[in-house]
Image (cartoon, rainbow, N blue to C red):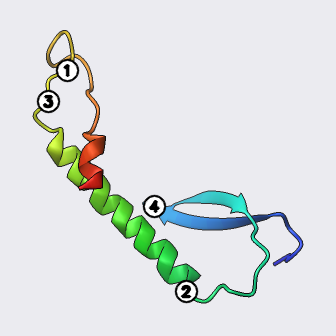
Amino acid sequence: MDHNDPEITDVVVIDGAAHSLKVPRVTTRNTHGTGCTLSSAIGQGQTDLTRALAAGAEWELSYAPQTGHGPVHHMAMRA
């Protein structure tokens, strides 16, 4: 690990495939809880997206029904 690297790379594995997530490094000694916070954010993101999918599931916004994909209901994530 190079503490002089300007970026941090987190790796998430989904269905056996590794994905790199890079963010700028923040120079600080106050790092206690970073892993828990990141995992909670991922979990909350999954919950929010599920809520948005369910809220927009019945929408039919395509000009020709059954031919296109409509959006998720993004405002439901703020509920």
Amino acid type indicated by mark 4: Ile
Q: Quadrant of residue 53?
A: top left
Q: Which of marks 3 and 2 is nearer the N terminus?
A: 2
Frontmost of labels 1 and 4 is 1
Q: Which of marks 4 and 3 is nearer the N terminus?
A: 4
Question: Along the horizontal axis of the image, is 42 left or right of 60?
Answer: right
Amino acid type indicated by mark 2: Gly
Q: Earlier in the sequence, mark 1 or mark 2?
A: 2
- Mark 2 residue crowding within 10 angstroms, few (<14) / some (14–19) / many (20+): few
Q: In which quarter of the image is residue 32?
A: bottom right
Tell me the distance, in whole angstroms, between the alpha carbons under discs 4 and 3: 29 Å
> Is disc 1 in contact with disc 3, using a CB cutoff of under 8 Å?
yes
Q: Which of marks 1 and 4 is nearer the N terminus?
A: 4
> Is 21 placed above or below 54 here?
below
Tell me the distance, in whole angstroms, between the alpha carbons under discs 3 and 2: 40 Å
At horizontal 83% and vertical 63% (from top left) the residue drawn is 6
Query: Furthest residue to the left?
Result: 58
- Mark 1 residue crowding within 10 angstroms, few (<14) / some (14–19) / many (20+): few
Tell me the distance, in whole angstroms, between the alpha carbons under discs 1 and 3: 6 Å
Q: Where is residue 1 in the image (x, y as percent from the top left)?
A: 81, 78
Image quadrant containing the C terminus: bottom left
